Amino acid sequence: MNLLPENVTSVEDFIGNAAFRSWITERRTEDRLVWNQWLAQNPEKRELYEQAVATFLLIQGEKVNLSDQQVTDRIANILDRLPDAYIVRKPFINWQWGRWAAAAAVIALVLWWQSGNLTLAPFTKTDGQTAQILPEAEWTLVRNVTGQALVVLLPDNSSVLLSTNSQLRFRKRANHALREVFLQGDGFFEVTKDPAKPFIVYTASLTTKVLGTSFQVHSFEQEKMAYVKVKTGKVTVTPVNAPDKPVMLKVNEELKLGSAAGQAVKSANFLSDENPSAIIARKFIFNYTAVPEIFSQLEASYHMPIRYDRSLLSHCTFTGKLDDIPFLEKIQLICLAIESTYEIIDNQVVIHSRGCS
C-alpha cells in the first residue's frame, strides 16, 4: 500500500494521495484495517476525511485515473454547483463548510459507501444536518516514553495506567455526551461511574465500551494479538473486523483477537496466569492497614509519587475496598477517612494532614 497522508489540511490533500484513492476505488480488506487505525490515531481529521470520500465519489463516477489538475478542477466544479443554503459558522481552511449541509446526496453517498466498508468512531453532531469538527486544540495526546508505566488523569477523574511506548488521546474537557479515548499500546483503565455518559476506548483492532469499571486494553500497532481483560464490572468489546458481533465480558474474563479476520477467543479466569504484581491482579483491599503502607502500595502500582509526613500518619489506618475506582478516588477516600486533604503538584500527590490521635 502507498504511504498514508500526513499533515493533511484540505480535501485536496486527501484526494491527491495515492493510498487514499486506492482505498476508495478498490476497497480492500487489508486497507480497511489500515484506515481504521489511521482514523483512530487522527480523530480530529475524521470530518475532513468524510468530505474527501464524498468529493472523490462524486468526481469519480466510475473507476478512472485522474491527473492532479483534473482532481483540482473537478473539486472546484462540484463546490460551485452546491447551493449557498446555510450560513457558514465554522470555516475550515478555504472550504465553505455550510455547503456540505445542503448536499444531502453527498452525505447519502458517503453513508452508502461506509456501510459495508469501514467502522468509524462516533462523532459529535451540532444539529441534524452538520457535523462538528474536533480541532486538535480540544484534545490532549500523551505519549509514554519514560520506560515505565505512567498514570494519566482524565477530565472525568477516571485514570489510565499507560504502559511505556503507548499513547493516549482524550478530550481536555468532560462536557460531551460520550467519554471517548483513543489508545495505541497498553493501558489499564479505572473508570469513574457515570451511567449517563458511556466510556469508550478506541483502538485499531477493537472498541471497548463501559459505564464504570476497571479493565486492561492491549493493542499495539506492531503486534498481531490484541486483548481486553476485565478486573471489575462489565465491558462490551467489538472487534473492528466484526462490528456486528459485540462480546460481553465480566469479572476475570478476557477476549483475545488474532490476526485472522473474525478470530476472537473469549476465556475466563485469566488471573491464574497473571503476574501477581501486575495491577490488574492486585487487590486493593485493606483492613485497619497503616496508611503509609497503603501509600507505598499505591506508589509502586501507579508509579506516581505520594508526598506526606510519615511521622504524622504513622498512627493512621484505613479499612475499605478500593479495587474498582480510579487512582484519585482512592486517594480521596483515604484522605476523607483520616481527615486530610491532597493536591496534585508537578505530577505528584501531596498529602496535607494533622495526623491521627
Image (cartoon, rainbow, N blue to C red):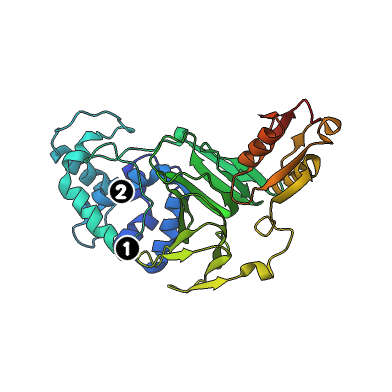
Q: Toward the viewer: 328 or 111? A: 328
Question: Residue 213 at what x, y percent from top left?
Answer: 53, 52
Report if residue 65 is visible in the image. Answer: no
Drawn side of residue 16 relative to residue 267, left or right: left
For label 2, the crowd category at 10 Å Cα-Cα, with few meaning under 14, some 14 to 19 and many 20 or more, is some
Residue at numbered disc 1: 117
Q: Position of residue 85 (x, y in %)?
A: 14, 33
Q: Residue furthest right?
A: 311
Residue 350: x and y in percent read: 72, 30
Secondary structure under tag 1 reads loop
Q: Nearer the viewer, residue 183 or 17?
A: 183
Q: Are marks 1 and 2 in contact (CB under 8 Å)?
A: no
Q: Is residue 312 left or right of residue 122?
A: right
User: Image quarter for residue 253?
Assistant: bottom right
Mark 1 or mark 2, which has the lower sequence index? 2
Q: Residue furthest front?
A: 357
Q: Is residue 217 above or below residue 199?
A: below
Residue 50 is labelled as: 2
- Helix, strand or loop at label 2? It is helix
Q: Quadrant of residue 273?
A: bottom right
Query: Residue, x 22% and y 34% (percent of image)?
Result: 98
Q: Is residue 84 above or below residue 259?
A: above
Q: Residues within 10 Å of mark 1 (few under 14, many from 20)?
A: some
The spot of residue 247 in percent (x, y) is: 44, 66
Residue at point 24% right, 55% down? 111
Q: Is residue 291 left or right of residue 205?
A: right
Amino acid type, residue under disc 2 in the picture: Glu
* 43 with respect to 154 (left or right): left
The residue depicted at 49 percent of the width and 58 percent of the height is 234
Q: Does the rendering let one see residue 126?
A: yes
Q: Residue at x 71, y 41 (%)?
A: 304
